[in-house]
Image: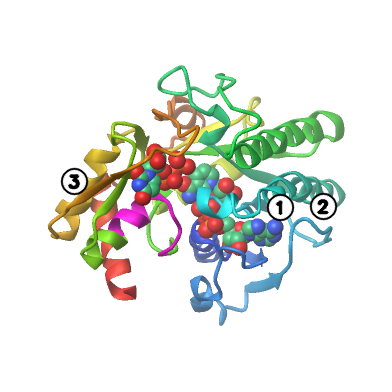
């Protein structure tokens, strides 16, 4: 099996490449290194079944592969808002290029969508049939709407051209190989705790997120890619339903890092979702998937990783 992972040098992508190789696949990792690093995949370079291509998904490419995991897209607000037009191009043109390739070589394709398609959700927890509450013109829209169009393209290529598609809606995921300056809350808090800096809580810290450790997430991605069912082309939430406020997360980082924590409250960014928790019934039924790693255990591993790096 030849498997393409776009965004394979990024945080989630590098863990996915590693597991696919361990399971015996041949892996082609494609990345433009915007937020990805060679360092994340350096340990895979000696494997004869691993190949690296520097390429931008907004340009067409043709590769003979059996499966495509399309992860290429910056995921942190700091990075996706750096060049918002490019973010839209990456999601939309990248999706069209990858779907065109999937159609041509008859590959199965999985799109890394996001819980952000639910925007600031008015139902809680979020089920896959919820259409979402997304601002189309805000600072987060380049990411949210880009990912929504990507889902539309997936469904239309499936219905119109019979492309074999899978859509995963990933909820907040954390772990080793996040960037120090990534800007997402887990890496920010862990790095700040280790440096003895104040933890920056945006707003009053009562907004919630549900944090999934990266090994659980990639396990879910591979299960979904290889699952068969009549409604398998419909989106599937993958995330850990344990929900925490940002104040609780700060405490957990204190607990797991063994550091004394001081917090500093900063203004809440516009359109920041107030609550988020996946309903994972569909993943449980379809894939027999459940997250295994509780927050404190995953945080400990993340703390150890950043402690070694800093
Ligand atoms: P990341 O920023 O670490 O990884 C993204 C990778 O894509 C990087 O290696 C980057 O260099 C590459 N990339 C970006 N634009 C590209 C382009 N135009 N062409 C080729 N490569 C490009 O982020 P991540 O957390 O690993 O996220 C991976 C995927 O999962 C993304 O699609 C993201 O939207 C999705 N996702 C992640 C989360 C999360 O919590 N981590 C949540 C929801 C969805
Ligand atoms: N956040 C925070 N401090 C930080 C970074 C983020 O309080 O240093 C908050 C942010 O406002 C949001 C939550 O943490 O409410 C999760 O932010 P992240 O960027 O990790 O993910 P997303 O908002 O995309 O879910």
Q: Position of residue 257 (x, y in %)?
A: 19, 59
Region of the chain picked out in magenta, as a range: 180-190
Mark 2: secondary structure: helix
Asked if ligand 1 lies within 8 A of label 1, the reply is yes
Marks 1 and 2, how far apart at CA: 21 Å
Task: Quickly name the residue at label 1.
Answer: 86
- For disc 3, the neighbor class at 10 Å (few under 14, some 14 to 19, many from 20) is some
Task: Quickly name the residue at label 3.
Answer: 251
Compared across the picture, whether 209 is left or right of 273 comes to left
Compared across the picture, whether 172 is left or right of 255 comes to right
Q: Earlier in the sequence, mark 1 or mark 3?
A: 1
Asked if ligand 2 lies within 8 A of label 3, the reply is no
Question: Which quarter holds ligand 1?
Answer: bottom right
- For disc 2, the neighbor class at 10 Å (few under 14, some 14 to 19, many from 20) is many
**The magenta stretch spans residue 186:** yes
Q: Farthest residue toward the front?
A: 267
Residue 5 appears in the picture as rendered: no
Q: Position of residue 173 (x, y in %)?
A: 42, 47
For the C terminus, the image quarter is: bottom left
Front position in the image: 149 or 196: 196
Marks 3 and 2, how far apart at CA: 46 Å
Label 1 with label 3: CB-CB less than 8 Å: no
Labels 3, 2: front one = 3
Q: Residue at x 54, y 35 (%)?
A: 116
Task: Quickly name the residue at label 2.
Answer: 101
């Amino acid at each position: 099996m030849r498997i393409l992972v776009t965004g394979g040098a990024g945080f989630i992508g590098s863990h996915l490449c590693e597991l696919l190789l361990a399971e015996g696949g041949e892996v082609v990792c494609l990345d433009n290194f915007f937020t990805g690093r060679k360092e994340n995949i350096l340990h895979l370079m000696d494997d004869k079944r691993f190949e690296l291509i520097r390429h931008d998904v907004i340009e067409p490419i043709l590769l003979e592969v059996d499966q495509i995991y399309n992860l290429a897209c910056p995921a942190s607000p700091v990075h996706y808002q750096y060049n918002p037009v490019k973010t839209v191009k990456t999601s939309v043109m990248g999706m069209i290029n990858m779907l065109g390739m999937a159609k041509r070589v008859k590959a199965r394709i999985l799109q890394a969508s996001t819980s952000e398609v639910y925007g600031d959700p008015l139902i809680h927890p979020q089920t896959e049939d919820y259409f979402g509450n997304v601002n189309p013109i805000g600072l987060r829209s380049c990411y949210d709407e880009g990912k929504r169009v990507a889902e539309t393209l997936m469904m239309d290529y499936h219905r119109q051209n019979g492309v074999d598609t899978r859509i995963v809606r990933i909820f907040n995921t954390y772990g080793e190989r996040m960037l120090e300056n990534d800007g997402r809350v887990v890496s920010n808090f862990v790095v700040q705790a280790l440096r003895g800096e104040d933890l920056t809580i945006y707003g009053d810290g009562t907004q919630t997120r549900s944090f999934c450790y990266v090994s659980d997430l990639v396990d879910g991605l591979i299960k979904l890619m290889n699952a068969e069912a009549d409604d398998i082309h419909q989106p599937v939430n993958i995330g850990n339903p344990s929900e925490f406020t940002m104040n609780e997360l700060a405490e957990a980082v204190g607990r797991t890092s063994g550091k004394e924590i001081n917090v500093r409250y900063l203004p809440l960014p516009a359109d920041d979702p107030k609550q988020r928790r996946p309903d994972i019934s569909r993943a449980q039924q379809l894939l027999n998937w459940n997250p295994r790693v509780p927050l404190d255990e995953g945080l400990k591993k993340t703390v150890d990783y950043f402690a070694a790096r800093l």
